Amino acid sequence: MKNIYLKKGLAIAAAAVLLAGCSASAAASSPAVSSASAQSTSTSGTSTVTTVNASANAVIDTADLFTSRDLEQSADTSNAEYITAEDGKDISITSEGVYVISGTSSETTITVEAPEDAKVQIVLDNASITNTDSPVIYVKSADKVFVTTAEGSVNTCKVTGTFTADGTVNTDAVIFSKSDLTLNGTGTLNITSSQNGITSKDDLKVTGGTWNITCEADGLEANDSIAIADGNITINANKDGMHAENDEDNAKGYVYIAGGTFTIQAEDDGIQATTICEIDGGTFTINASEGIEGTDVEINGGDITISASDDGINAAAKSTAYSVQIIINDGTLNITMGAGDTDAVDANGSITVNGGIINITAQTSSFDYDTTGTINGGTVTVNGEQITEMPSSMMGGGMKGMQGSQGTQGRSADAASGSTQTKQS
């Protein structure tokens, strides 16, 4: 994982470093693999590269967030190992390289146990694997693992029963990684899970591909961060659609989204971050108890549609390292709230609107905040009526957000965007 620094001084703690970890190393050839069936071949083809446009208002410094290899949507298969999955036979990867997996099997786990400086790329090319109690892909060790869907391929990974722990490791996802994990490609992966869909115990990145996840727990889960540059992601989760949380360090666990298309149906939160949840772009359809949640929620762009039964967007004190606030600088937000004690935009701190288009349909409360609420710019419409002052926040019920008052001045509205730089893989 890489060092990610805040661009603006929003942290309460003196340190501005969000994440720290190991550095990247150069790729090597001569992959090592033990499997049911393997043969060497050489192919080449055209490549697609995802570009990332970060907002000038970005809180997270994205210059080093994605590597050039993260953003490359096809693998260099010139020295790849081609493997056909077979029933009841695991695939063991022990060194850096590119491995192309195809075929249909059951009770097959692709295990990566490579050196700590190794980069491993698993290319799924019309692979279909169903397991009863173990992950389809299990990363025990590596510097980083790429899971890439081959062009035009349709892949399926399922775990149907109760996951069996690996010693003290609760391997509770169809793709479970103890190392940095990047998802990319130009094909499709369909995941069905009795627990989580995809889990990284480090950083999780998505830069392309189509990912359809149906799961009993969280769809995308990471300890330190979830960062998405692009992709077509559909999640149907019985817990959270996306969840970033580090149980040992509440200064970690952010979500950053620059682009992509997202359809999320979740019983709990659509997107949940412990620290910062920043959206710079993308198209979102979220149906959940709470749509978007974090300690610091920053909306700098995107087309976001939320239907929620609790809070549409919520800032709560999940981290002691960041201010509790919601800042909306740009984007289009359509928020529809259910009946009952619900808030469209709710902060246990401050709410600042500097720009964008916000349309709220709420039976009870449009805005609810504990400290200040400010509209500096943008177009805000509540139940069909445009407002220029944020409604008062009245804790404990009553008229709760139905009277008008002007809050204190918030951060300036500057919705310009710029391109990120990329580092070596």
Image (cartoon, rainbow, N blue to C red):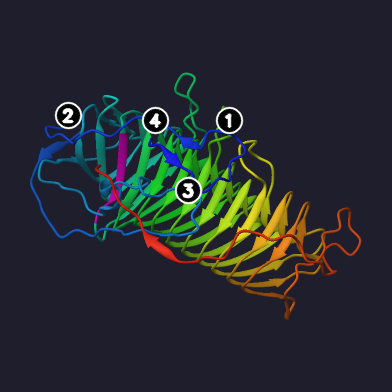
Q: Residues under labels 3 and 2: Cα distance? A: 41 Å
Looking at the image, tell me whether mark 3 or mark 2 is earlier in sequence order.
3
Looking at the image, tell me whether mark 4 or mark 3 is earlier in sequence order.
3
Q: Residue furthest top?
A: 167
Residue 338: quadrant of the picture: bottom right
- Depth-wise, is mark 3 or mark 2 nearer the camera? 3
Q: What stretch is highlighted in magenta?
A: 144-150
Q: Residues under labels 4 and 3: Cα distance? A: 19 Å
- Depth-wise, is mark 2 or mark 4 nearer the camera? 4
**Foreground: 102 or 67?**
67
Would residue 175 be seen by someone viewing this image from the given angle? no
Local SS, label 3: loop
Q: Mark 4 near mark 3, Cβ–Cβ under 8 Å?
A: no
**Residue assigned mark 1:** 247
Looking at the image, tell me whether mark 2 or mark 4 is earlier in sequence order.
4
Which kind of residue does numbered mark 4 sit on? Gly
Main SS class of the magenta portion in the image: strand
**Residue assigned mark 3:** 7
Q: Considering the image in quadrants, where does the N terminus appear? A: top left
**Residue assigned mark 4:** 21
Q: Mark 1 near mark 2, Cβ–Cβ under 8 Å?
A: no
Q: Residues under labels 4 and 1: Cα distance? A: 17 Å
Residue 373 placement, left or right of 291: right
Q: Mark 4 near mark 1, Cβ–Cβ under 8 Å?
A: no
Looking at the image, tell me whether mark 1 or mark 2 is earlier in sequence order.
2
Looking at the image, tell me whether mark 4 or mark 1 is earlier in sequence order.
4
Q: Residues under labels 2 and 4: Cα distance? A: 26 Å
**Residue assigned mark 2:** 32
